[in-house]
Image: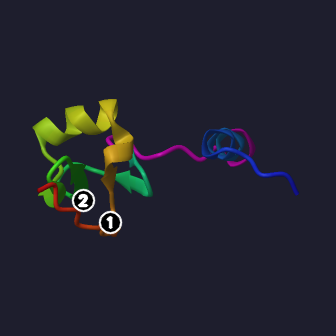
Amino acid sequence: MDAITEERLEELLRQRYGLEPKAGMLKVRDGYVTEGDKVWWRGSTGPEHVRVDYEHIRNIRDYPNVYQIAKPKIEVTYLD
């Protein structure tokens, strides 16, 4: 079986079964979140566990790949 993109899979689920994400759900790297959920923000200084609020909702819509549900694995690099 050929691999399909996540967008294509969502499109097929809508067409075949009429499944739609619930209103207010926001796409992140590994799933969907809603306002008030806790999510990992992959910030420039390291991951932060933040609550999805007004500020983060706007950011998630613009940059969904910098947020995820599962705790990210990180590697520390010293610059000096």
Classify 10 Å Cα crowding around label 1: few (below 14), some (14-19), many (20 and above): some
45 falls in the magenta region? no
Q: Which mark is residue 72?
A: 1
Residue drawn at the location 13% of the way across and 45% of the way down: 53
For residue 19: magenta? yes
Where, by quadrant of the figure, is residue 69 drawn?
bottom left
Camera-side residue of 20 and 46: 46
Residue 26: in sight, yes or no? no
Q: Residue at x 36, y 41 (%)?
A: 64
The residue beneath circle 2 is 40
Residue nearest the observer in this picture, 7 or 42: 42
Image-based side of 48 in relation to 11, left or right: left
Image quadrant containing the C terminus: bottom left
Q: Position of residue 70 (x, y in %)?
A: 35, 68
- Where disc 2 sits, the SS reads strand
Q: Main secondary structure of the magenta part?
A: loop
Please state the horizontal and vertical placement of residue 65, each as a whole percent of the image.
38, 44
Labelled pair 1, 2 in contact (Cβ < 8 Å): yes
Dot 1 amino acid type = Pro
| Quarter of the image where the N terminus is located | bottom right
Mark 2, Cα crowd under 10 Å, few <14 / some 14-19 / many 20+, is: many
Nearer the observer, 77 or 58:
77
Amino acid type of disc 2? Answer: Trp
Magenta segment boundaries in residue numbering: 15-24
Q: Where 74 falls versus 22 (above or below)?
A: below
Q: CA distance from mark 1 to mark 2?
A: 7 Å
| Colour convention of the picture | rainbow
Front: mark 1 or 2: 1
Look at the picture and state if 24 lies above or below 2.
above
Which quarter of the figure has residue 12? top right
